[in-house]
Amino acid sequence: MTLVEHICQRGGEVTVFDPVATQLAKPIFGDRVAYAKDAYEALLGCDVALIGTGWPDWLQLDWQQAKNAMRGNFVFDARNSLRGLNLPDGLERLQIGAGP
């Protein structure tokens, strides 16, 4: 079971964005998730941003604008794609397998 399915089963709301795989995700998730047209729309009002790809859309994001759009302040970088990127003050990046 995927993380998205776990969140949905527990009553969470999920908005997804992937410039390549959205069409592949629709048959899997159907209408249980919202599909954003871009990264900023996906982050609008979110409590936590989960970045699961290294697509340029995430790497080239204006993270100050993203921070302003988000309700929460956590960016969970599941692939360490944002390593070395300076996020604005107030956003906290959480990484898998990254030391202190």
Image: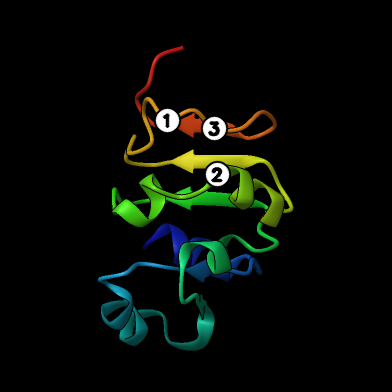
Q: Amino acid at mark 1?
A: Leu
Dot 2 alpha-carbon crowd within 10 angstroms: few under 14, some 14 to 19, many 20 or more: some
Q: Contact (CB < 8 A) between labels 1 and 3? A: yes
Q: Residue at x 67, y 41 (%)?
A: 73
Q: Which mark is residue 87?
A: 3
Q: Tell me the quarter of the image containing the N terminus.
A: bottom left
Residue 27 lies, with reference to residue 85, above or below; the image says below
Q: Which mark is residue 63?
A: 2
Q: Contact (CB < 8 A) between labels 2 and 1? A: yes
Q: Residue at x 46, y 12 (%)?
A: 100
**Gap between marks 1 and 3 measured at Cα:** 6 Å
User: Dot 1: what SS?
Assistant: loop
**Gap between marks 2 and 3 measured at Cα:** 6 Å
Residue 34 lies, with reference to residue 92, above or below; the image says below
Q: Which mark is residue 57?
A: none
Q: Mark 2 vs mark 1: which is more N-terminal?
A: 2
User: Dot 3: what SS?
Assistant: loop
On screen, residue 20 versus residue 26, left or right, reads left
Q: Contact (CB < 8 A) between labels 2 and 3? A: yes
Q: Residue at x 65, y 58 (%)?
A: 46
Dot 3 alpha-carbon crowd within 10 angstroms: few under 14, some 14 to 19, many 20 or more: some
